[in-house]
Amino acid sequence: SQQGEEDPQALSIQEGENATMNCSYKTSINNLQWYRQNSGRGLVHLILIRSNEREKHSGRLRVTLDTSKKSSSLLITASRAADTASYFCATANQAGTALIFGKGTTLSVSS
Amino acid sequence: GAVVSQHPSWVICKSGTSVKIECRSLDFQATTMFWYRQFPKQSLMLMATSNEGSKATYEQGVEKDKFLINHASLTLSTLTVTSAHPEDSSFYICSAYGTSPTYNEQFFGPGTRLTVL
């Protein structure tokens, strides 16, 4: 079963704009991760945020985590055409090992 | 960083045949590997957890007799799709779990696209 639910399902923006994607999950977590997947390719790990963290930055990425609302957001600032991809949040399953992925947000950045 | 490879990267087979997909951790030992399946425009769904030297644990709804998993060494897990049918056509991705278990750090392979005619 899927743990996370992302919204929006699809997002289209212009280069230079910011893109915000949200993720909600159902159970308690130790951490939450965000991944990117280019069409038909493997996953690229973007960032991990622990349950005791509220915000984390990595380059143009900013992730927030609100454990009280069981939600996280990924902000990509000053987007580029190369950011076009699907973005997934993921949390650990009950065993604490495998990752359970959300449905993903498909981001299209046009130049 | 740690590297996980998959072979083949894509395969086309006839209905009824079996296909084997390999997942290798190239520069680290992985006691646990995972197999995911991804249908077009959908998310990754966990199929099974593969532990070195023991039987795989399958997720609900995944047929263990159809998707045979073998994890014979600390660097290799294989997924065999037996008697493949067109509905098995999908993108299969493995991951290996090894370096930072405390934070559930996994390294993903590049995926194998299976097309069953």
Image (cartoon, coloured by chain):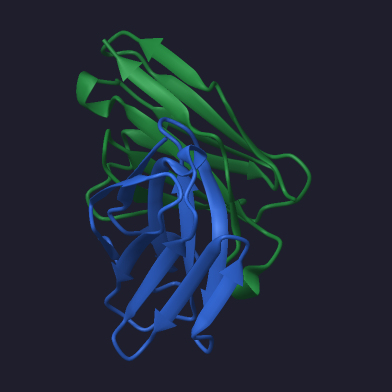
* Quadrant where the image shows the C terminus of chain A: top left
- Is residue A29 something one can see in this rendering? yes
Residue drawn where x is 27% and y is 27% of the image: B88
- Which chain does the green colour mark? B
Name the image quarter holding the N terminus of chain A.
Answer: bottom left
Between A93 and B80, the one nearer to me in the picture = A93
Which residue is located at x 68 percent, y 67 percent? B100
Q: Residue at 33% across / 47% down in the picture?
A: A13
Q: Is residue A93 above or below residue B117?
A: below
> Does residue B107 sit above or below A84 in this rendering?
below
Query: Which residue is found at the position 37% from the left and 84% from the top?
Result: A28
Provide the letter of the chain coloured blue: A
- Residue A14: x %, y % from top left: 36, 44
Where residue A80 appears, as percent x and y from the top left, is: 49, 44
Looking at the image, is A62 positioned above or below residue B65? below
Image position, residue A71 (x, y; %): 32, 77
Query: Residue A72: horizontal and vertical position, in percent?
Result: 37, 74
Residue, far right: B27
**Would you say residue A96 is visible in this rendering?**
no
Asked if residue A60 lies left or right of residue B65, the reply is: right
Q: Quadrant of residue A24?
A: bottom left
Residue A67 or A94: which is nearer the viewer? A67
Question: In this orientation, which residue lies closer to the viewer: B99 or A82?
Answer: A82
Query: Disc count in the image?
Result: 0
Tell me if B112 is positioned left or right of A48 in this view.
Answer: left
Placement of B14 over or under A40, stated as above or below: above
